[in-house]
Amino acid sequence: MTDNPKTDPTTNAEKDPDDWVTGDEPMTGAQASYLKTLSEEAHEAFPGDLTKAAASKQIDALQEKTGRGR
C-alpha cells in the first residue's frame, strides 16, 4: 500500500458503502438513473428513496441479477 492514495488511486477505489462518510445522504441522480434502468431490466420495483450506501448495494445486487457491470 502506498502512503499517498492520490498517487495510487486504485488502492481506495472500492470502499464498503457502510463506511462511506456520506452514505446516509439521499442517492445521487446518477445512482437513481442507473438503478431505475437496472430495476426495469430485472423486472423489480424501483426503490426511489434509498440512501447513497443502500443504492450502491442495490445496484450491486441488480448488476449481479442482470449480468451488467461485469
Image (spheres, rainbow, N blue to C red):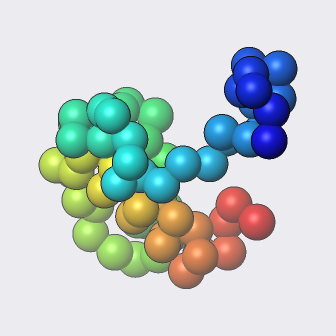
Compared to residue 22, the image places residue 68 above or below, namely below
Residue 64 visible to an observer of this rendering: yes
State the residue at coordinates (48%, 72%).
Answer: 61
State the residue at coordinates (83%, 20%).
Answer: 7
Residue 64 is situated, as x and y percent measured from the top left of the image, at 59, 76
State the residue at coordinates (58%, 68%).
Answer: 63
Q: Is residue 48 left or right of residue 28?
A: left
Compared to residue 57, the image places residue 33 above or below, namely above
Q: Is residue 2 left or right of residue 22?
A: right
State the residue at coordinates (31%, 32%).
Answer: 22
The foreground one among 4 and 18 is 4
Which quadrant of the view contains residue 65? Answer: bottom right
The foreground one among 45 and 64 is 64
The quadrant the N terminus occupies is top right
Which quadrant of the view contains residue 66? Answer: bottom right
- Among all residues in the image, which is located at the extreme front? 3
Q: Is residue 24 left or right of residue 38?
A: left
The foreground one among 50 and 38 is 50
Q: Is residue 48 left or right of residue 66?
A: left
The quadrant the C terminus occupies is bottom right
Residue 40 is situated, as x and y percent measured from the top left of the image, at 42, 65
Residue 51 is situated, as x and y percent measured from the top left of the image, at 24, 46
Residue 27 visible to an observer of this rendering: no
How many numbered discs, if any? 0
Residue 5 is situated, as x and y percent measured from the top left of the image, at 72, 26
